[in-house]
Amino acid sequence: MASKVETGREAGATPERAPVGAVIDTDISARLDRLPWGRFHVLVIVALGITWVLDGLEVTLAGSLVGALRQPPMSFTEFDVGLAASSYLVGAVTGAVGFGWLTDRIGRKKLFFITLALYLCATAATGLSWNIYSFCIFRFLTGAGIGGEYTAINSTIQELVPASARGWTNLVINGSFWIGAALGSFLSIVLLRPEVIDPAWGWRVAFFVGGGIGLAILFLRRWIPESPRWLVTHGYAAEADRVVTGIEKRFTDHGVTLPPPDGSKHNRLKVRHHTPLSEVAQAMFVTSRKQTLVGLCLMIGQAFFYNALFFTYALVLERFYGVPGGHVGWYLLPFALGSFLGPVVLGRFFDTVGRRPMIAFTYGISAVLLAIAGYLFKIEALGATGQTAAWMVVFFFASAAASSAYLTVAETFPLEIRALAIAAFYALGTGIGGVSGPLLFGTLVESGSRGAVFAGYLLGAALMLIASVVGWIWGTAAEGKSLEDVSKPLAAA
């Protein structure tokens, strides 16, 4: 059923874009949610989910290549390593906010091309760095591209994937960060071997790889449509109908008989071309203040937890276990692969058992296991291999918890401010927990005190435990529900 526009004028041809204030009666959401899982959704995962692979690649390369970066000509200190990590995160925060605002204003598709182009240019430029200052500038720009990707991609995925599979899909895509981490570990192993390439050049080549992957994905994204939900809200009812009809045809051409959309799921939306920032603030801090509290706690907890630990894990291996820089990748590789299994295995339960119990469980068990693993580190009970195995267990649960934070923010705020909400929480969570974490842990590791590092681990565990309680008490039971039922659009008529 095509969307119907009520303009209050005499009948005539529907304009390309309905005027502000016109009311659109649409079943776009119902048509998207009733689709079975198919090849189209796989394409969405591959073309858009690559963002997290690239982020994992960038983070792991920065950590795995520490040994090479500490050698001439770069000669980084432990503080420089922490500064570079924080530069990347500051860039991600800045990019998330700026591009998040644009994503809600001018559309999802334009932005996921712009942000990917920025990423691939900046990460390639990182390989041409000549000192700590140039390295940090390029890392900042790389982070800005990735931060912008987070907002545009999370919004698009939420709005294209059926409600029945939204939780699992979101967790797996966010968890694919660890595929990138595994790739980064492998590259560091190969490119830091003197018999393969001079280590002074190997780290540069590693950053070029990320740019190459980004370039290939630019072409794949040509086949991803603009979000029909965004289109209809902004007055492009005919275009939204055309996009959904095209998606449906992908299924019917392969012999799939689609059930009729739920007739009770029609939405009447009043067209708006943009949402004023005052209305954004009203929605986030007044109308949806409970969701704001939950999202902020989840984001801060996970950001401090895994940024602090993962960005400095290579330093821990080198400082406390004497692992050569060229061998760090061997320890990060199984660590990353184990972490990817967490969202894959646990993701289904977010759609069946429910959001609130699973968020509380994954955050809570991560806090307990981190405290235990940190204590074992303090008393020197484990060697490098044993400590890596302990972190694998911790991050099996923690990676699912971190992914659920993005899922929660993306589905519990209205479409009109979804990307900006993701950006705001990502910025606040990363700014408070992510930027401070690597700098704090870099200083703690540099002190050479296991007790000091353990205290940092306990701080991370406490933040995760608080997030677990908040998620259980005030979280939203969004499993299986349409986005419009979870959070009513601001444009609802």
Image (cartoon, grey):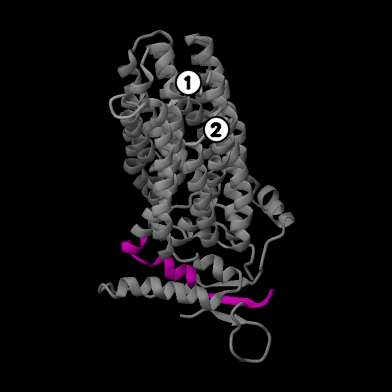
Kind of residue at disc 1: Pro
Q: Give the Cα separation between the discs numbered 2 and 1.
A: 14 Å
Q: Residue furthest left?
A: 255
Is label 2 or label 1 in front?
Answer: 1
Q: Is residue 319 depicted above or below 473 in this figure?
A: above
Magenta range: 18-41
First in sequence: mark 2 vs mark 1: 1
Observer-nearest of 33 and 361: 33
Which residue does the image show at 37% across and 24% down from the upper left? Answer: 391
Q: Which residue is labeled 2 in the image?
A: 135
Q: Residues within 10 Å of mark 2 (few under 14, many from 20)?
A: many
Kind of residue at disc 2: Phe
Observer-nearest of 125 and 265: 125
Q: Is residue 406 depicted above or below 278 in this figure?
A: above
Does the image show residue 180? yes
Which residue does the image show at 34% across and 31% down from the upper left? Answer: 191
Q: Which residue is labeled 1 in the image?
A: 72
